[in-house]
Amino acid sequence: NGYGHAGASKLQFTAIPSVTADVDTVTVPVGFTWQPVIRWGDPIFKDAPAFDLAKQTAAAQERQFGYNNDYTDILEIPGSRGRRAVLFANHEYTNDAIMFPPSMPAADVRSVSQAAHGLSVVELERANKTTPWSYVKGATLNRRYLNSTCYELTGPAAGSALVKTVADPAGRWINGTLGNCAGGTTPWGTILSGEENFNGYFVAPGTSASDKRYGLTNKPTARQWELDDPRFNTNNPGYENEANRFGWIVEVDPFDPTSTPKKHSSLGRFKHEGANVIVAQSGHVVAYSGDDERFDYLYKFVSKAKYREGDRKHNMTLLSEGDLYVAKFTGDSPAAEIDGKGTVPTDGSFDGKGEWLPLVVGGKSKVAGMSVEEVLVYTRLAADKVGPTKMDRCEDVEPNPFTGKVYVACTNNSDRGKAGKEGATEINPRNENRDGHIVEITETGDQTSTRFTWNLLMVCGDPAQGDVTYFSGFPADQVSPISCPDNLAFDSVGNLWISTDGAPSGIGRADGLFKVTLEGAERGRVEQFLAVPRDAETCGPIIHDDERTVFVSVQHPGEEGTFEAPNSYFPDYVRAGAPVQRGQARAPRPSVIQVFRADA
Ligand code: FEO
Ligand code: CA
Ligand code: CA
Ligand code: CA
């Protein structure tokens, strides 16, 4: 069936040469071109004003596409014969220093930055399958999810004393979502999004074990929303639990603009990078999720109920109840062979066995001294008690739909091996891990199994600069240099695609998108497809290789610049002296872009 073989995909390209980090363009392969699908500030409702960098208001931003799009997917609208689709994107955070004129009043900055967070759902259209997509202003499914949008908390923590506030005495209804990073699309066509760095939005006492473990401190936050809304300071009476209402996996139905989005407590609370679901042979659904923090853990959820093909209403309840596990990895090579530089052990691979340690099973806590509610709200503290493996910042974790093998992007860990910190092990084999690695997990038997084997698919870096790297035996002088893997995706024949965040400070190259062959003689071959503009990370890759089209979210372009001296002009490229056309901006704008054949 051509599974896993690069040649079986319709998307053929010649890898681009690695791009230096100061280049402010999107670099695509020969024969391809790119254009934005939607940009920060693009109006998505009929009454929304055109973007105007100099006159930003919260009222306008609430009706426009938000900032710093991360997880993105595009789902065809059934019955549209490929001519209409719905785009989902989340808006992880804002870069206030490059978004707003220095003269803008601080209170206005705060209100616009709040409105630039959240989620967006926008309809797309195209003339036919060979033409690029445009977004449809005012379309029926268009929706902004704002900090005032109500989410229903599901699962055992819903209604618990740990999540109640004066504004929600029931402990079930939460306004807003924060720090949304990666995500996943479920087999039933909903979107999952991970609430990652939520701690940065709260002032807290900072003294409890949980405040410390989740990075909550008693300092003013960067955006200071606590000045306008008491819930962002958990020192305030009645709001002690507000931060417990963030750090969840969110589920959204992009096909129903009136639906109530969910936060699923059964998947635990931590800095969820995202979550990805696969249906096991047994019919249960399994969700994998990483906690993106140095020395934190990898988790797996198994639903109590089974998937029913075609029963969307039922399937949308599957993530509300089930078992939660955390991963423990064991290597099979002697510790003496792990040199902390990433050199392969003498048995030829970084590999071993592992087990999923239970935290909650059958609705009961498996952690001594903690209730189910406590395990789910203070999941990091619960996991600490059962001895899981401390990882190098698990970002995206995604099962391959063709094989069920699970891929984990460990992006980097600058602290590994430093004084007082755990040193290199076979699963995290490099001290001061600058460039990251990819773990491949094979569950033993069914996807719901508590046992697995594992190996490293690659240890990243730039072999040409002398980095010690590993690409499953593929010759290092024939790969594109790659650093700081973040988001993962698969194409229609099962090749892995990796987008990166951090390569400029790693190998000194622009971040990008890379295809990795998984099967056959070319396993481990890395080919760079694109590079993003200056200071940007590459997010939310969508590989429609059957249509020879790739989409990525370009997040935080020009992040290191200032409003008055931009580091990037992506994607409008209105440079100093040139007139600004209506709807354009002389500033970097995070955007979703499409890359397609120029000759299509
Ligand atoms: Fe928002 Fe873990 O990257
Ligand atoms: Ca080994
Ligand atoms: Ca990420
Ligand atoms: Ca990242």
Image: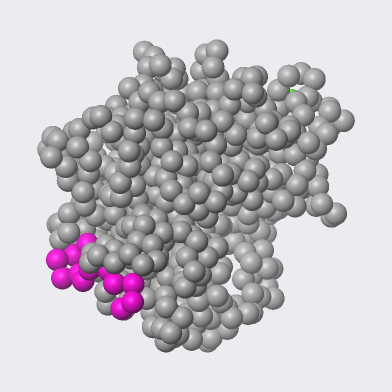
User: How many numbered badges does the structure rendering display?
Assistant: 0
Q: Is residue 307 magenta?
A: no
In the image, residue 48 lies in the stretch drawn in magenta: yes
Residue 549 seen: no
What residue is at 43 percent from the left and 41 percent from the top?
27
* Residue 388 lies in quadrant: top right
The spot of residue 463 in percent (x, y) is 68, 31
**Left/right of residue 77 with respect to residue 462 in the rendered view:** left
Of residues 118 and 43, the one nearer the viewer is 43
Q: What residue is drawn where x is 60% and y is 78%? A: 204
Q: Quadrant of residue 217?
A: bottom right
Question: Could you say where residue 577 lies in the image, as x and y percent from the top left?
Answer: 36, 67
Dividing the picture into quadrants, the one containing residue 462 is top right
- Residue range highlighted in magenta: 44-55
Question: Where does residue 267 sit, x and y in percent of width and height?
Answer: 49, 51
Q: Can you give x and y, in whole percent of width and height, for residue 525 in the image?
A: 55, 23
Outermost right residue: 336
Q: Main secondary structure of the magenta part?
A: loop
- Compared to 215, does 182 lie above or below? above
50, 283: nearer the viewer: 50
Q: Let me know if residue 34 appears in the view.
A: yes
Residue situated in front as seen by the camera: 255 or 108: 108
Residue at the far front in the pictured view = 577
The residue sitting at 85% across, 54% down in the picture is: 419
Question: What quarter of the picture does the C terminus occupy?
Answer: top left
Q: Is residue 569 left or right of residue 269?
A: left
Q: Can you say whether 109 is above or below 159 in the image?
A: below
Residue ID at (47%, 51%): 24
